[in-house]
Amino acid sequence: MIPPFRRIAALFAAVAMASAAAHAQPRYQFDTTPGHLSKQVVPSHYRLTLDLDPARDAFDGRVAISVRVRRSVPAIELHAHELTAQDARLMSPSGARVLTVVPEPATQTWRLAPEDGQPIEAGEHRVEIAYRGPVHAYADGLYRAEHGGERVLATQLEAIYARTLFPAFDEPSFRAAFELEVRAPRGLEVVSNMPGVGRRIDGDAAVHRFAPTPPMPSYLVSLAVGRFDRLEGRAAGVPLRMLTAPGKRAQARYAMGVTQQVLPYYTRYFGVPFALPKLDQFAVPSVRWGAMEDWGLISYTEEALLFDPARSSPETRHAVYATVAHEIAHQWFGNLVTAASWEEIWLNEAFATWMENKVMDHFNPSWDVPLQNRLPVDRAMALDAGNATRAIRSGPVAETAVWDVFDGITYAKGGAVLAMLEQWIGPEALRRGLAAYMQGQRLSNATAGDLWHHIGRASGRDVAAVAASWTDQPGFPLIEVTSACENGRSRVHLAQRRFVTPGTAPAAGSWKVPVRLRQGRRVITTLLEAPQGSIDVGPCSDEPVIVNADGAGFYRVAYEPRLRQALTQRFARLAPADRVTLLSDSFALAQAGELPMPAYFDLLAAMAKAPAHPAVWTLATQQLHELDIALAGTPAQASLRHTAVPLLAPQLARLGWTPRRDDNVQTLQLRGQLIEALARFDDADVVREALRRFDAQAAGGAGLLGSIRSAVVHVVGMHADQARFDRLLDGLKAAAGEEERQMYAQALAAGRDAGRAEALLAASLAGVAPPNIAAAIPGLVAKESPFGELAYRYTVAHWAQLAELAGTTAKPELLPKAAAGFNDAQRAAQLIEDQRRAAGPVGNTPAAREAQAIRLRAVVKARSVTL
C-alpha cells in the first residue's frame, strides 16, 4: 500500500502530466502524420481495372495511379502484398520509363525504381502496374462467399488489405479519388462505392464502369460481384438499396426501416448531407465477420443486417439496429472525415459507437439503451483495470498489429467518455462542435486536436484539457465517497485513485472527472480536477448521496460502509440507471477485493425485492455467469448455483415463456437470457420445458417462437443426448443463413458430453460450416462447455489448420478464445507461451488480455467464497 501522502504527491504529478498531454494534441498536418511511406510522393487518383470471376481463385488487375512527386526521389515506394507484378511503368511529361519492382515483404511494400537508374523528378506522374492476386477463402482483402452452391466476391480492405487487391498508398492520410472498371461474367451484377456509369459486353463477360469517388483512403474501396436480390428505398434524398443473397430480400426490410430513420437524423444532427449519390448495404451470405463502413457500399455479415420476424432472436433485432446505425454514422465519422492514422482510429470508432447509442435511444426510448450499454462498458472497464490495457489514443501502432486497437478501449470506453463529456458540456454544445468539425475537416483527415478545437470553441470550455486526461492515459479512477452533515449542510468528500484488479502493476493516475451527484431530488454536476475534493450538496438529508447519478461516468464508485448500506436498503427506490450502476460497481469491487463478496450478494437480495427492470436483471444474470466460470471446479460453484436459481427463477415465472404484446426488446432479451442461465445452473424445470418444446417441433408440432428460439436451442445443446445432438448438427450443416449457423454452433458447443465435444471439434476441420464458423468452434466449446481443456489442446494441436480457416485478422484470437474458460493463473502463463510459439508477436495483445481475465478469475476462485 502506498502511504496517503505519497499517493497524493503522485496524483498531483499525474495531473500535471495530463494537463501537458492536453497541449500535445496538435491539429492535423499531412507531413507530420505517422506512417511508413514517404510524404514526398502523394497520390491523387487511381484508375483501377479488375478482371474478376467468382469461379476463379485468382484475379488480374491493372492500376494507373496519378501522383505528385514533391521533390526528386530515386524510387517510389507503395504498399503491395500477396500480389505478383507483371509490368510496371512510369508515365511522365518526359516520356515512359520501365520500373523495376523490388518487393519488401517485411513492410508489405514494393519499391519501384526506374530501370535507367535516373531519379524521378518533381512534378506530376502516373504509375501504371499490371499484376495478379489471390481470392481469399476468408474475409480479408478480396474474398469469396457461397450461398446455395453459388459464389459471390466481396471485399474487406480495412485495415491494411487494400494492398492485397491493388498496389496502393495504403495509409489513411493518403486520400485519393478511385475510378473502377470491373470485368466479370455477363450474368453477374457488379456493385461498388459509386453508381455505375457504363456497361459494355466483351465476349462472355461484361465490363462495368463506375463514377469516381471523392478523395478517400484506400481502405474504403469496396466492390461485390454475384447474383443479388435487392430491396430499394429512399431517405434524406438518397437512393437506398439492400443487397442480399437470392431469396432473402424480405429479411432486409427491418434494416431498410432503420436506415430510413438514422440517415435523416445524422443529416440533421451534423448539418452536412450524406456525401455520395447512393447508399448500398450488402448482406454477405457467409464467411464475413462484423461489418465494414465502405463509403456508399457497406457490407455486413448476414446476422448484422437481416432480420426474420418469425425466426430471429430479439438480440438480432437489437444488433441489426445498432450495427446499421454504427456503420451509417461512419459515413461521416471515418469517411467524410478520416482519422489521420491508425493511432487516432478512436476518432472513427468511438464516435460511431456513441452516435449509434444516441440515435438508437432517440428512436427506441423503451429500449433503455444507456442501461443496456452497461455490459460493453463493464467489459471495457475490466480490460482497462489491468496490465493489458492502453490509452484510447494508443500511440504508435505497428501495421501488423492494427487490429489490436479495434477493441473495447476504442469502442466502448471511447464512446462512454464521449457520453460523459456530453453530460458535462451539454448536448447542444457538443452537437455544434461536431457540426463545425465536420465542416472544417470535410474530405480530409483529423486528429484529437482538431476535434477538441471545434468542441472547445462551441462550448466555451477547455475541453481539450479534460478530454486528454481520459484519452491520453490508460485506466480510469475509483471515486471513494464519504459524506457528513456539517452545520446543517450535507458535504460529500470525493477522492480519486486508479482502479486496478489484483496483480496489476501499481500505477498512478489522475483524471479531470465530470461527476454527477444526486441526493433526493437535488442533482449537481461538478468537475473533480484534483486527487480529492469536497462539495456542498445542500441541506442535510436522510437520503444517501448517489455519485455517478444516471451512470454516464466512466469510473467506479466506492461508498463508505454507512452509505453503501443505506443505498442497499433503499435499492428498490433508486432509479433503474442508479441501480444498474451500483450493481455494476459492487460486482467489480467484489472481484477486485475492494468489497466483501457477501456485500454484493446483499445487493442481489435487495434487487429481488425491487421493481423488476430488464436491464438490472440482464446485468445480474451476466455477473452470475462470470462468477460461475471463475468458481468452476470448486465447492463454491455448486453453492453459487443454488443461490442463483431461486434468485432468477421467479423472474422467469413472472415473464413466462410466451411473449406479451407490451414486451419491449429488453424484456424479450431477458426472457431468453433467464432461460439459458437457469438451464446452465441446472434448473430441472427449465431444462425439461426447453427439451419438450424442441422435441415437439421436431415431431411436427408448433415451431419455436422467434423470441425464445435461440435460447431453447442453446438449452437443448447443453443437455442434449445423442439424438438431439445429431439433430442440432444436421441443423448446422443445413443452415441457410449466418444467424442459424451461429445459433446451432453455439448450442452444439455447450454440450456436457466429452465424446460429443470431441466429435464437434473434429467436425470443425471437416467442412461442417463455412470457415468463419468452423474456426470459431473450439473457442465456443471453451466458452460454453465444461471442456475448455479439451478445446485448448485441440486448438494447439491444429493451430495451423484453424489459422488457415480464420484468416489473417482472426487467427491471433484462436488460442485466447480457446482459453476463455480457464480460472488458473498457471494457464494464463501457458497461454502466453503457446501464443508466442504459434502466432508470433502479432498475437501478444490478444493473449495478454485473455491472460489478464484468467488471472482475475483465479483470484476470485482462490477466495473460495462460501455463498
Image (cartoon, grey):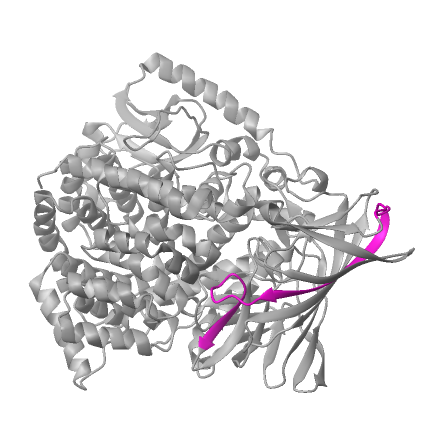
| Residue 385 falls left or right of residue 357 | left
Q: Is residue 145 magenta?
A: yes
Q: Which of the 4 image quadrants contains residue 132?
A: bottom right
Q: Can you say which quadrant of the picture contains the C terminus?
A: top left
Most distant residue in the top direction: 5
Query: Which residue is at the front of the view, 231 or 32?
Result: 32
Q: Which of the 4 image quadrants contains residue 97?
A: bottom right
State the image coordinates of residue 187 (x, y, percent, origin top left). Answer: 59, 86
Segment colored magenta: 117-146
| Residue 719 falls left or right of residue 176 | left
| Residue 748 falls left or right of residue 116 | left
Most distant residue in the right direction: 94
State the image coordinates of residue 447 (x, y, percent, origin top left). Answer: 61, 41
State the image coordinates of residue 483 (x, y, percent, origin top left). Answer: 27, 25
Helix, strand or loop: magenta stretch: strand
Query: Which residue is at the front of the view, 412 or 429?
Result: 412
Q: Can you say which quadrant of the picture contains the N terminus?
A: top left
**Is 168 rendered above or below residue 248?**
above
**Is 464 rendered above or below residue 617?**
above
| Residue 126 falls left or right of residue 467 | right
Is residue 473 visible in the rendered structure shown here?
yes
State the image coordinates of residue 103 (x, y, percent, origin top left). Answer: 66, 51
Is residue 279 visible in the rendered structure shown here?
no
Q: Is residue 129 magenta?
A: yes
Residue at position x 36%, y 66% from top? 316
Residue at position x 48%, y 49% from top? 403
Query: Which residue is at the front of the view, 564 or 447?
Result: 447
Counting labels gives 0
Query: Which residue is at the front of the view, 480 or 14?
Result: 14
